[in-house]
């Protein structure tokens, strides 16, 4: 029995398997550097930690601010389940970042650093999940995660610029900007709000 830190509950598994080249062996003990496979029914996400009971927390895998944004929609209504499953799993892998509008959860926006990521997402959705998608460009080219120790100041900022706010999979808000000048202007005009280029910096703060 192990402790699943993110889930906050025990996890039991049968037959943990060590992999070495072409060999597979059932094991009871593993060491740093060992590659071990366990059965997963959808419990785990990338970056999860299993311990013998300790509550160990590691700094998260950073998500860098995208530079290309597209709204994404399902191109085949008959494949909605496959589309959503594929998009969620590929986003978890880090193929793209997925954002939603705070009050319109059905509107999904993907963010990438390069055009190739859009092509990879489209290809893998089709060939691995049997789903297809459509993209629609939006005018923004920059984003920063936003946070503040002043909850009222943060909420006022989010309300004022709600048309430029999205939330990531951890429900952290991001602010969209058309160019660097506008982003810098926002930082100057809103000193109580902190702007972060990666999600890791936001996750590491108590906001």
Image (cartoon, grey):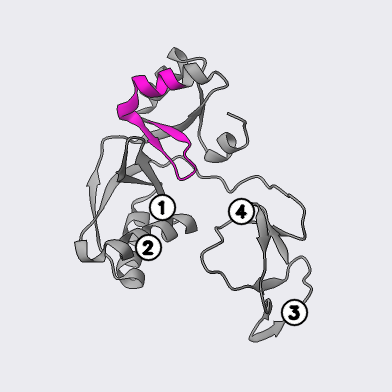
Identify the disc placed on residue 27: 3
Circle 3 SS class: loop
Label 1 SS: loop
Please identify, in this view, whether the residue under mark 1 or under mark 4 is nearer the observer. 4
On the image, the x and y values in percent for residue 130 come to: 29, 71
* Residue at the disc numbered 4: 7
Q: Residue at x 65, y 82 (%)?
A: 21
User: Camera-side residue: 26 or 188?
Assistant: 26
Residue neighbourhood size for the residue with mark 1, other residues' Cα within 10 Å, grouped as few (<14), some (14–19), many (≥20): many
Mark 1 in CB contact with mark 2 (< 8 angstroms): no
Gap between marks 3 and 2 measured at Cα? 32 Å
Residue located beneath label 2 in the image: 86
The segment highlighted magenta reads 155-175
Do labels 1 and 4 touch, CB within 8 Å? no
Q: Give above or below for 19 relative to 113.
A: below
Q: Between marks 4 and 3, how big is the CA–CA gap?
A: 24 Å
Which residue in the structure is indicated by mark 1?
96
């Amino acid at each position: 029995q192990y402790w699943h830190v993110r889930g906050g509950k025990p996890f039991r598994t049968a037959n943990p398997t060590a992999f070495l080249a072409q060999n597979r062996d059932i094991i009871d003990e593993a060491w740093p550097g060992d590659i071990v496979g366990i059965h997963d029914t959808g419990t785990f996400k990338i970056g999860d930690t299993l311990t013998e009971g300790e509550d160990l927390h590691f700094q998260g895998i950073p998500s860098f601010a995208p530079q290309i944004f597209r709204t994404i929609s399902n191109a085949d209504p008959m494949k909605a389940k496959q589309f959503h499953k594929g998009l969620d799993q590929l986003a978890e892998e880090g193929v793209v970042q997925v954002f939603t509008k705070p009050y319109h959860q059905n509107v999904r926006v993907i963010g990438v650093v390069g055009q190739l990521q859009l092509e990879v997402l489209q290809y893998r959705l089709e060939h691995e999940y049997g789903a297809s998608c459509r993209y629609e460009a939006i005018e923004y080219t920059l984003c920063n995660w936003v946070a503040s120790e002043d909850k009222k100041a943060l909420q006022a900022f989010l309300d004022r610029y709600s048309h430029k706010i999205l939330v990531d999979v951890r429900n952290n808000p991001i602010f969209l900007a058309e160019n660097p000048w506008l982003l810098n202007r926002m930082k100057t005009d809103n000193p109580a709000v902190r702007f972060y280029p990666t999600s890791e910096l936001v996750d590491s703060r108590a906001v």
